[in-house]
């Protein structure tokens, strides 16, 4: 090999499409989503499509959601998929809005009965209605169906009646992938203890620093059917304000997903989950700190990186939207080769969230924010 050759990992395309301006309306939108932040964004995106307020977007545009499954766990013999269910219940109008997860009008008899038996763990609550979803999922998995097929079956109840073919929910992978978090524990020989992500979040409330995040099974998993095509064939790909490490970060770690994002002709735009230097809710601050990324809107955008940057950096974005409060970081993001703008990014209601989606689309398509295609 000549000494001047710049080594390029064979999996990363060395030439990128230069994203010619879209010739038709945007009719296929793919979103890489976690749970609560992603689900809220999706509600606003769907609202914007239905209301016709998204620039260049067809009135019958279809949304494909690729959801994180690294938060999944087995408990009481049941397979639990928190992010898939949060997206499904939120878009299906079954979510408990106050909690942000699980079913509305929930009761907790099974949880109480398990506690009366002294069954551990008691820190993870499953409501009675929610348990039905988990029983169906687990039965289907036991019968040999892959998670993607199970998810489609569950969505036949929650999404199809409302959206027809307009919203499709895909797990990032059918394989078992689990995020584990290392925390300090003086009582162990190593001074550390590794807990499942849900234990870190729900039982420890993300109050102790995450010393490391380990995503077991990520490197060897396969993307679920439809995931790569959803990115490659999209007219627009969105990274919503989801956790950049344990939601979007895990999806980006699924083999071939990053390459598909770098190769797609669709513009790829992200919205910052960090506003005014803090995570809005959740534990994005702990996760970013654990991987050495500053807790700021600009730093997260640079962490995702520009598609036009050094191929070895594997950047995935064309545009990055930050909140008005972070307007001072726009220049730094632009210098890295990304389109960037500062707009209100708090998902306070459907209109505000749809406006965020409109601004994100305008940023990477050059469209005005006046209306639909
Ligand atoms: P999870 O799976 O429930 O943690 O949900 P996600 O990964 O989809 O998103 C959680 C992250 O979304 C939080 O850590 C916040 O950083 C971000 N977030 C939540 N609400 C908002 C909001 O209103 N605006 C913005 N910009 N980010 C938000
Ligand atoms: Ca999650």
Image: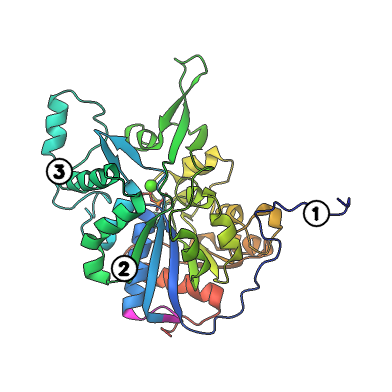
- Eyeballing the image, is 139 above or below 265? above
Where is residue 83 shown, x and y percent of the image? 35, 50
- Which residue sits at x=59%, y=41%? 292
Please tell me whether residue 55 belongs to the stretch shown in magenta: yes
Q: Which residue is mark 1?
A: 6
* Mark 3 nearby-residue class (10 Å; few <14, some 14–19, many ≥20): some
- The tag earlier along the polypeptide, 1 or 3, is 1
Q: Residue furthest front?
A: 144
For residue 350, which numbered disc appears in the image?
2
Where is residue 108 shown, x and y percent of the image? 13, 40
Q: Which residues are magenta?
A: 51-57
Which of the two residues, 61 or 98, is positioned nearer the viewer here? 61
* Mark 1 nearby-residue class (10 Å; few <14, some 14–19, many ≥20): few
Q: CA distance from mark 1 to mark 2?
A: 47 Å
Observer able to see residue 86: no
* Image mark count: 3
Classify mark 1: helix, strand or loop.
Answer: loop
Observer able to see residue 84: yes
**Mark 1 or mark 3, which is nearer to you?**
1
Q: Is residue 164 left or right of residue 311?
A: left
- Which residue sits at x=13%, y=51%? 105
Q: Which residue is mark 3?
A: 128
Quarter-of-image position of residue 135 = top left
């Amino acid at each position: 090999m000549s000494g001047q050759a710049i080594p390029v990992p064979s999996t990363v395309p060395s030439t990128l499409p230069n994203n010619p301006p879209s010739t038709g309306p945007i009719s296929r939108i793919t979103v890489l989503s976690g749970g609560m932040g992603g689900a809220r964004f999706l509600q606003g995106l769907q609202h914007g499509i239905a209301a016709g307020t998204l620039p260049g977007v067809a009135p019958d545009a279809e949304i494909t959601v690729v959801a994180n499954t690294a938060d999944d766990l087995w408990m009481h013999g049941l397979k639990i998929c928190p992010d898939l269910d949060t997206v499904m219940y939120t878009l299906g109008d079954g979510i408990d809005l106050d909690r942000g997860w699980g079913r509305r009008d929930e009761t907790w008899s099974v949880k109480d009965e398990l506690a009366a038996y002294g069954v551990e763990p008691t820190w993870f609550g499953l409501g009675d209605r929610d348990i039905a979803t988990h029983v169906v999922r687990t039965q289907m998995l036991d019968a040999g169906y892959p998670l993607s097929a199970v998810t489609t079956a569950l969505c036949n109840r929650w999404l199809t009646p409302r959206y027809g073919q307009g919203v499709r929910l895909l797990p990032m992978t059918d394989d078992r992938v689990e995020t584990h978090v290392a925390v300090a524990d003086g009582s162990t020989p190593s001074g550390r203890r590794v807990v499942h992500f849900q234990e870190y979040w729900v039982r420890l409330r993300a109050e102790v620093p995450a010393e490391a995040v380990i995503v077991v099974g990520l490197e060897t998993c396969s993307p679920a059917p439809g995931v790569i095509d959803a990115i490659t064939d999209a007219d627009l790909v969105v990274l919503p304000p989801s956790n950049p490490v344990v939601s979007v970060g895990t999806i980006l770690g699924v083999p071939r997903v990053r390459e598909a994002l770098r190769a797609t002709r669709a513009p790829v735009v992200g919205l910052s989950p960090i506003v005014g230097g803090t995570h809005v809710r959740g534990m994005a601050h702990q996760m970013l700190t654990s991987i050495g990324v500053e807790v700021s809107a600009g730093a997260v955008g640079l962490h995702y990186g520009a598609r036009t940057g050094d191929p070895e950096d594997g950047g995935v974005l064309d545009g990055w939207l930050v909140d008005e409060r972070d307007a001072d970081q726009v220049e730094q993001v632009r210098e890295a080769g990304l389109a960037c703008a500062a707009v209100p990014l708090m998902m306070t209601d459907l209109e505000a969230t749809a406006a965020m989606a409109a601004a994100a689309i305008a940023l990477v398509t050059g469209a005005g924010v006046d209306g639909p295609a």
